[in-house]
Image (tube, rainbow, N blue to C red):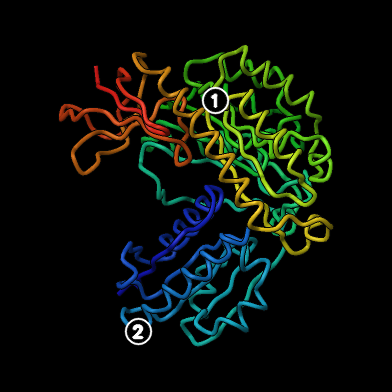
Amino acid sequence: MRRTVGVVSLGCAKNRIDTEQMLGLLRAGGWEITADPAQAEAIIVNTCGFIDPAKQESIDTLLEMAQYKKSGRCRVLAATGCLVQRYAAELREQMPEVDLLMGVSDYPQICSLLSRAFLGERPVAVGCSRDVFEAPRVLTTAPFSAFVRTGDGCDNRCAYCAIPLIRGGYRSRPYERVLAEARELSQRGVREITYIAQDTTRFGDDLPQGNLATLLRDTARLEGVHWVRALYCYPTRVDDALLDALCGDEKICAYLDLPLQHIDGRILRRMNRKGTPEEIRALIGRVRSRGITLRTTMIVGFPGETEDDFRRLLDFVAETRFDRLGAFVYSAEEGTPAAQMEDQVPQEVAQERLDRLMTLQQGISLSLNRARVGSVCEALLEGRDESGRWLARTRQEAPEGDGRVILTPDASHRAGEFVKARITGADTYDLTGEIL
């Protein structure tokens, strides 16, 4: 009888790909995958270690899954991923509930390490590798949409970020292997490909040929692919070739995810972010002139951020009117330069600034959504809500991060279809509409 394994994936879409590749290895190794943790003899929690709330969520999830050793069939609880890579020794000492600890470079060993744990060992594997983990995948997204990784690690060395400490410096996957994975997914019925990495705009720098713009164009030519997009673009690496690619093919979504983090020049320098406020504004002008949907991320409460610095950020957001904006409070991460900086902003001040920023963005988002009422667009049907209405996205909404378009019930369609829809109503983040 085959052993059963369940997996909980936390954190970003890049972590999800690691999880899907582990599931592929487990299935090939004879494991039976279950979505019910009560039925799993082994439970894997693929953790996130990016910022404090993510770390706490990982620990809480491990403790929650450990209860299935009492109430379910679980014999082995495994912690994998970024949190383990950073804190394996502490987790081994402080969490006796965990039977296996495995970092981000050791996913290929998942089957053998689990087998050792079932024999009573307590393996710890936190190696360091320059290879980008690749394995057959078991998709955990809807069957018509998938993320594809273009590389791993990061060379930007932002002062607040622990990613280089966890995943090392940047390295691209070979161009043909990335495109081959997109082709294989499209042959399996995936209609939307979303390229991701810590910095997708760096793709190809370490390869003999190819870059993100050419990858988008080549992917758009694949039979079966209907939409392709890229997330996590670094501002100073976005050039006209990439912007032209985003607008040059109807299959390539004219959508740019551009994490800016701040606009004050002094704060950007302290963050070790490349580019000046003037260069950022010039880039936004080039993006806007092409009609590209613009998403960004901001950090509030970075060490040394004054009220005036924050007001400049507010003014910039009000002036730019981003289509999508996410923000989070700065988190002091061990081993990063920012954690050693003076003038750490009190948590309550940073939280108050976050609230003000997101209140501003809510008004902007509502206004922009209302401006879309009456328009006709192509929408991807993702599933139904409890009342039977379709939950959908357009080219202007990326998977898992943006709002949705809620469409009237229509039994003649199925999930994964692309339909024409008219927008009839707007909320702060979501839209409503009807299928035409």
137 relative to 277 in the view: left or right: left
Q: Residue at x 42, y 73 (%)?
A: 64
Instruction: Indicate the amino acid at tag 1.
Output: Tyr
Residue 55, given in percent of the width and then of the height, sits at 58, 64
In the rendered image, which residue does mark 1 sit on? 255
Q: Nearer the viewer, residue 179 or 321?
A: 321
Q: Is residue 420 visible?
A: no
| Horizontal and vertical percent position of residue 143 | 35, 41
Nearer the observer, 367 or 151: 367
Residue 113 showing in the rendered view: yes
Question: Looking at the rendering, in which quadrant would you find the C terminus?
Answer: top left
22, above or below 381, in the image: below
Q: Please tell me how crowded label 1 is: few (under 14), some (14-19), or many (20+) other residues with Cα within 10 Å.
A: many
Q: Secondary structure at mark 2?
A: helix
Residue 29 quadrant: bottom left
Q: Quadrant of residue 81?
A: bottom right
Sooner in the amino-acid sequence: mark 2 or mark 1: 2
Judge the density around disc 2: few (<14), some (14-19), many (≥20) Cα neighbours within 10 Å.
Answer: few
Quarter of the image containing the N terminus? bottom left
- Label placed on residue 61: none
Q: Residue at x 62, y 42 (%)?
A: 197
Horizontal side, residue 252 vs residue 380: left or right:
right
- As shown in the figure, which amino acid type bears the numbered disc 2? Lys
Which residue, given by chain and number where applicable, does mark 2 sit on?
A: 70
Identify which residue is drawn at 33% across, 31% down. Answer: 392
Q: Looking at this view, is 290 or 242 the one in front?
A: 290
Looking at the image, is 375 positioned above or below residue 238?
above
Percent x, y for residue 277?
A: 78, 28
